[in-house]
Amino acid sequence: MKIKILTLFPEMFKGFISESIIKRAIEKEVCEIEIIDIRKYSPEKHHHVDDTPCGGGAGMVLRCDIVDMAISDNKTDKSQVILMTPQGIPYSDKLARDLTKYDELVLVCGHYEGFDERIRSMANMEISIGDYVLTGGELPAMIVSDSVIRLLDNAIRKESSEDDSFSNGLLEYPQYTRPVSYKGMDVPEVLLSGNHKEINRFRLKESIRRTYLKRPDLLEKKELSKEEKVLLEEVIKEENV
Ligand SMILES: C[S@@+](CC[C@H](N)C(=O)[O-])C[C@H]1O[C@@H](n2cnc3c(N)ncnc32)[C@H](O)[C@@H]1O
């Protein structure tokens, strides 16, 4: 997959692409990330890319002609052009999985007051990473890129993302590592038993328990298997004594 990120602040991505899993994914050619400075499309002497809002008001608005040039120069027939905006579709695990199907993503980061309204017609999709407002689209673009890249083949071990929260409609079960005993807190015995059937049952039940306790809305949306229904009943009894 190729991800192109259009931004006014290319330097912000230096750490993102040069560390950990994203760095390795680039090295293994799982993905390619290109950071493009929108300012290079500005015809202005001082590379200005924004102007005051028509009708007055605070802040500066990104110019549609400049962003249009930047998008047109970077999209291909295969690209999905996505605006980062708090007014977009709420981002989710499902959307991240949907985005893995594209060969190319062009992520457009706004800044200041945001985009001239006409820029919306140049994109295939708008994504919001949550109901709050950030100073720019750079962190949202990193969040979308990171969450998509880790789902691509060979980015991480497949089993790691298969058990992650949301992937099967539940929160992930609790994880432990050594030391086995720490300040009176012990690793559950079953995890040390070597009995994989029991370990899997424990993990599924605890996954259901924490979803029931922390995110009951997820359980309402999930179609439970026979085993999951039995475990949920057990959890409900245990949690409501
Ligand atoms: C200060 S915000 C502009 C907000 C805009 N005036 C509004 O109220 O919708 C500047 C830029 O940050 C990015 N941004 C801020 N919050 C975001 C969010 N929750 N999700 C995605 N992008 C966001 C967008 O690219 C936006 O154009």
Image (spheres, rainbow, N blue to C red):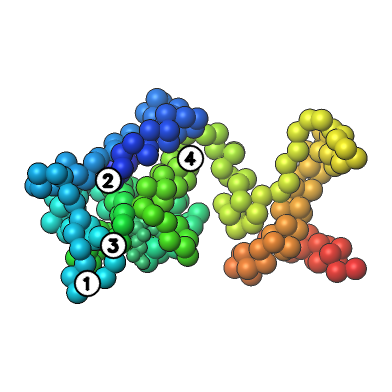
**Amino acid at the residue labelled 1:** Gly
Residue 149, numbered circle? none
**Amino acid at the residue labelled 3:** Gly
**Amino acid at the residue labelled 2:** Leu
Let me know if residue 163 appears in the view: yes
- Which residue is nearer to you in this view: 112 or 117? 112
- Which residue is nearer to you in this view: 86 or 61? 61
Residue on which disc 4 sits: 150
Q: CA distance from mark 2 to mark 4?
A: 25 Å
- Badge 3 residue CB within 8 Å of ligand 1: yes
Q: Earlier in the sequence, mark 1 or mark 2?
A: 2
**Amino acid at the residue labelled 4:** Arg
Please report the residue visible at 31 percent of the width from the left and 51 percent of the height from the top: 109
Tell me which corner region of the image, top left, top right, bottom left or bottom right, holds residue 171.
Answer: bottom right
Q: Is residue 107 left or right of residue 152?
A: left
Estimate the x, y position of residue 123 in percent, counting from the top left. 25, 58
Asked whether the residues under the numbered discs 1 and 2 touch, taking CB atoms below 8 Å apart as contact, a structural biologist would say: no
Closest to the camera, between mark 2 and mark 3, is 3
Asked whether the residues under the numbered discs 4 and 1 touch, taking CB atoms below 8 Å apart as contact, a structural biologist would say: no
Q: Quadrant of the N terminus?
A: top left
Q: Earlier in the sequence, mark 4 or mark 3?
A: 3
Estimate the x, y position of residue 143 in percent, counting from the top left. 45, 47
Please report the residue visible at 36 percent of the width from the left and 52 percent of the height from the top: 137
Residue on which disc 1 sits: 56
Closest to the camera, between mark 4 and mark 1, is 1
Estimate the x, y position of residue 162 in percent, counting from the top left. 58, 44
Q: Earlier in the sequence, mark 2 or mark 3?
A: 2
Residue 4 vertical placement versus 28 (above, below): below
Q: CA distance from mark 4 to mark 1?
A: 43 Å
Residue on which disc 3 sits: 59
